[in-house]
Image (tube, rainbow, N blue to C red):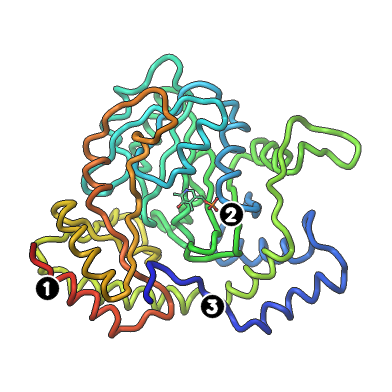
Amino acid sequence: MINVTKTFLPPIEEFTKILNKAWEKKWLTNRGDLIVELENKLSSYLDVSNFFITTNGTLPLQIALKSLGINKEVITTPFSYVATTSSIVWENCTPVFVDIEEDSLTIDPNKIEAAITENTQAILATHVFGNSCHINEIDTIAKKHGLKVIYDASHCFGVKYKGKSIFNFGDISTTSFHSTKLFHTGEGGAIFAKDNALFKKIYYHHNFGHNGQLEYHGLGINAKASEMQAAMGLSVLPYMDNIIKKRKELSLLYEALLKDNKNVRLYNYHKDCSRNYSYMPVIFESESKLLSVLEALKKMKIHPRRYFYPSLNTLPYLSNKVEMLISERISKRVLCLPLYFELEVVEVQQICTIINKNKL
Ligand SMILES: *Cc1c(COP(=O)(O)O)cnc(C)c1O
């Protein structure tokens, strides 16, 4: 069976050797040596500072909204994973959807200003499939209207925008180290903020608001990552260059084999953004073409994923339903093809043959 992704696991001895350090110290969480070591290594690998690792990639979104004092309207994208919208709703804010741009599938900056009201406080946008939003344009609008910017950069491990880590952009950036993501710690994530005062606040928020053992800085939650998660990250990190190299080869092969297929469109990346080959999205001409390819692949035990689907403005728990024409149209037609370290060239060829043969 070929799935959309297969979690990269290092030889188990490498994991247990690192985990052994936690055993020896009998220290499993609350910023143990392994978490600190992983943060130091990520800091140089990604060239980032002012960040820490969290227990998943969703709590950082909630903490981001909380620490910026957001409690009213948040402009956001309908084309993302459900966690982007659910975090807004969970924090008792109102998501105000702005449709995406057809090409980049990221929030359309030309439509943002029309959605701004006196209650708008922030923009929460997702960098899609490792491709950056229109960061400059969003920044300009945010400055003009006094809005905070949060980027859900869950797909962006290792991505550079204009030569700098993409995690450096926005007031706050968040990411996910879930086991389906490019780099993983089983479950995990991280949160980034340039402003030192804001960063301190975020840090307190993630550890119950503790300011030392006996004092509290304010309200908090538990978003700490454990030593088991750190051990996983430390044993995966040394493989990342190779993993990305292999995924690049496979992605370029997919693109070469699919480029002449009139039924599918390949995805365009922003010119200022480097690629991390985290996903292999293709956009079909119609949903029926997508479904017939999906069926043909399923027969061969190949399971790509409809991602992102459905468009988030259609979530059942939203009270205020709006139409997002482009996002709804695209999410019905986008498929992420299998892409992972162990995937073989012949398997990519087989998948492309099925896609190219399938003429509905
Ligand atoms: C994976 C993902 C999340 C959630 O991250 P978790 O680590 O699973 O909590 C949020 N947003 C996007 C865009 C994601 O892909």
* 31 and 307: which is toward the camera: 307
Disc on the earlier residue, 2 or 3: 2
Q: Residue at x 33, y 48 (%)?
A: 309
Inter-mark Cα distance, 1 to 3: 36 Å
Q: Residue at x 58, y 72 (%)?
A: 237
Disc on the earlier residue, 1 or 2: 2
The disc placed on residue 189 is: 2
Mark 1 vs 3: CB contact within 8 A:
no
Disc on the earlier residue, 1 or 3: 3
Q: Report the mark closest to the observer, 1 or 2.
A: 1
Q: Does the beta carbon at disc 1 come under 8 Å from ligand 1?
A: no
223 with respect to 349 (left or right): right
Question: Element under label 3?
Answer: helix
Q: Does the beta carbon at disc 2 come under 8 Å from ligand 1?
A: yes
Question: Element under label 1?
Answer: helix
Residue type at the position of mark 2:
Gly
User: Are there few (<14), some (14-19), or many (20+) residues within 10 Å of tag 2?
Assistant: many
Q: Position of residue 292 (x, y in %)?
A: 18, 61
Q: Position of residue 37 (x, y in %)?
A: 71, 66
What quarter of the picture does the C terminus occupy?
Answer: bottom left
Residue behind mark 1: 357
The disc placed on residue 239 is: 3
Total numbered circles: 3
Examine the image and state in which quarter residue 342 appears. bottom left
Inter-mark Cα distance, 2 to 3: 18 Å
Residue type at the position of mark 1:
Lys
